[in-house]
Image: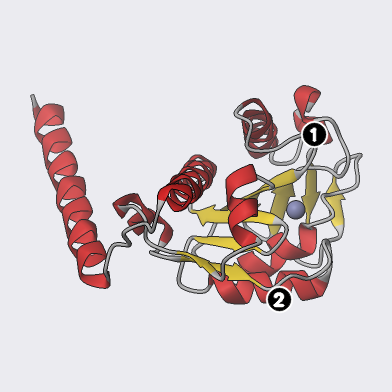
């Protein structure tokens, strides 16, 4: 089977989205880029029992290269994001409750927590367009530029990374920060971290990444 390992990974992540409550029914989609192909969840198929064979493989034009099922209705969105972001190798799109709620009242999720450094800072809300259209693909991929997360107005969230695990982790972070912001808003006026505070948090993240790498290198030598 073509790209069997990646198809299994996409199926497992789609199930993970469902069981973690980030989506209901089939209201989200997951993909991995493999060379000139994109491996993506099918349209309208129950995620509880997905098998690698149910996952579609499409080319850069969205034509099915392998698979028995119709690819996700948001395939144009995934293709547009890959085309305009050469470093991105995985995408998670979810209709998660708190990010979707944020999309209906704000133009961006402000920097409510330092963990948003991993998302590229404040997360913009892309304009509303009909699902599955090239127009939605265009406005969403444009809003994403330079970041790894975007919220889609009256629709949901989209996160990217170089691996599916990281893209899923960012989806969880975005949903958690959206929840924190809405909870804080219900009690008063939330404090928002400044650009300087976020820059210091990023430096600290980088510093701990370097320390982890150095620690691992020493351990491997022992
Ligand atoms: Zn959607």
Q: Residue at 18%, 42% (x, y): give it.
A: 213
The reply, left or right, for residue 171 in relation to residue 94 is left
Quarter occupied by the C terminus: top left
The dot on residue 25 is: 1
Of marks 2 and 1, the one in the foreground: 1
Q: Residue at 82%, 50% (x, y): give it.
A: 72
Q: Residue at 59%, 68% (x, y): give it.
A: 125
| Relative depth, front residue between 203 and 9 | 203
The residue labelled by disc 2 is: 138
Q: Residue at 63%, 52% (x, y): give it.
A: 101
Indicate the secondary structure of the residue bearing disc 2.
Answer: helix
The dot on residue 115 is: none
Local packing at callout 2 (Cα closer than 10 Å; few below 14, some 14-19, many 20+) is some
| Relative depth, front residue between 45 and 34 | 45
| Relative depth, front residue between 84 and 20 | 20
Q: Quick check: 101 above or below 7?
A: below
Number of marks in picture: 2
Q: Position of residue 27 (x, y in %)?
A: 77, 43
Quarter occupied by the N terminus: top right
Q: Is mark 1 within 8 Å of ligand 1?
A: no
């Amino acid at each position: 089977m073509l790209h069997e390992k990646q198809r299994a990974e996409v199926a497992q992540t789609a199930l993970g989205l469902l069981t973690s409550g980030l989506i209901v029914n089939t209201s989200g989609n997951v993909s991995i880029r493999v060379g000139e192909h994109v491996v993506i969840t099918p349209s309208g198929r129950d995620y509880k029992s997905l098998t690698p064979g149910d996952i579609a493989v499409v080319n850069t034009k969205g034509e099915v290269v392998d698979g028995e099922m119709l690819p996700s209705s948001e395939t144009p969105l995934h293709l547009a994001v890959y085309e305009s972001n050469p470093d991105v190798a995985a995408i998670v799109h979810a209709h998660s409750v708190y990010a979707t709620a944020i999309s209906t009242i704000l133009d961006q999720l402000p920097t409510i927590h330092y963990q948003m450094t991993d998302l590229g800072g404040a997360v913009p809300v892309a304009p509303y367009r009909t699902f599955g259209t090239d127009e939605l693909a265009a406005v969403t991929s444009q809003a994403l530029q330079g970041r790894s997360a975007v919220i889609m107005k009256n629709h949901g969230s989209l996160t990217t990374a170089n691996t599916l695990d990281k893209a899923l982790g960012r989806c969880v972070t975005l949903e958690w920060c959206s929840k924190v912001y809405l909870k804080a808003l219900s009690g008063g006026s939330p404090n928002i971290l400044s650009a300087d505070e976020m820059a210091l948090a990023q430096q600290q993240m980088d510093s701990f990444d370097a320390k982890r790498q150095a620690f691992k290198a020493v351990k491997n030598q022992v």
